[in-house]
Image (cartoon, rainbow, N blue to C red):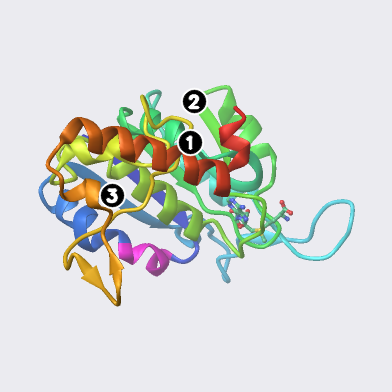
Amino acid sequence: MLKFDVITVFPEYLAPLRLSLLGRAIEDGVLGLDVHDLRDFAHDKHQTVDDAPYGGGPGMVMKPEPWGEALDQLLTPESVLIIPTPSGRPFTQAQAQEYSAMPHLVFACGRYEGIDSRVASHYSSKVRVDEVSLGDYVLAGGEVAVLTIVEAVARLVPGVLGNEVSVQDDSFAQGAMENLVEGPVFTRPPVWRELEVPEILTSGDHAKIAAWRHLQAMQKTAINRPDLADS
Ligand code: SAM
């Protein structure tokens, strides 16, 4: 079973992880999820988790002590500690696939100007620590990044999706789709507002349909993701 532990100052932010497919997988014991309030590990009167940055400048930085206490409790030698940050390596489907085979992922949700960098340095000598970015933009906190990463990983864990085969046809999936985005998809009715479903899709010729889909994926990749098409 893959177990997720999430540490945050906004535990309610993670509530959507208990809905839909993931919620069912957690209920069925295919996935485990615990969300921890960082303030439970801050012991002063105001349960302070932030302080002014060394070197000056605007904003606040998350103090290392509450993180240390929380992570000492949660990490085991098999854990991977994932720290979402815009300065991390870009999160990809290949990484989601790798995480989906792991036993324990621990997420540290930053807020303000981020977490004191000594937290990542300290735990790097004990477990694998991945600083992961969702993209080239800045969110207010790590919670939305964790919702995204957990959902992308969880749907690749066997037993979470109804139809395991469908993930092989997804954009970026390992194998034939690795550097491609998926092409257009259609369902009934055959004509909607004078727009017809491509005839090939109703032909019943599976080999031709597969070849058409591959061509569509290449065309869409060339238009929307020329960076992938060149790789
Ligand atoms: N001062 C930081 C910087 O410029 O790199 C940004 C801090 S941001 C306001 C607060 C938190 O949001 C970060 O610690 C991280 O947890 C999260 N965050 C923001 N943007 C992110 C991104 N693109 N990917 C992953 N996490 C992000």
- The residue that mark 3 highlights is 33
Q: Earlier in the sequence, mark 3 or mark 2?
A: 3
Label 1 environment density (alpha carbons within 10 Å; few <14, some 14–19, many ≥20): many
| Neighbour tally class for label 3: few under 14, some 14-19, many 20 plus, Cα within 10 Å | some
Q: CA distance from mark 1 to mark 3?
A: 15 Å
Question: Horizontal and vertical percent for residue 72?
Answer: 46, 37
Location of the C terminus (image quadrant)? top right
Q: Earlier in the sequence, mark 1 or mark 2?
A: 1
Residue 154 is a magenta residue: no
Q: Amino acid at mark 2?
A: Val
Q: Earlier in the sequence, mark 1 or mark 3?
A: 3
Q: Which mark is residue 81?
A: 1
Q: CA distance from mark 1 to mark 2?
A: 7 Å
Give the secondary structure at mark 2.
Answer: loop
Q: Marks 1 and 2: CB-CB under 8 Å?
A: yes
Based on the displayed image, in which of its 4 quarters is residue 30 positioned?
top left
Q: Quadrant of the N terminus?
A: top left
* Residue stretch rendered in magenta on the structure: 11-16
Nearest the eye: 174 or 142: 174
Residue identifier under label 2 = 127
With respect to residue 9, does 81 lie above or below?
above
Examine the rendered structure and indicate whether residue 199 appears above or below residue 129: below
- Type of the residue with mark 1: Leu
Considering the whole magenta stretch, tell me its main secondary structure.
helix
Asked if the residue at tag 2 contacts the one at tag 3, i.e. Cβ–Cβ closer than 8 Å, the answer is no
Query: Within the image, what quadrant is residue 120 found in?
Result: top right
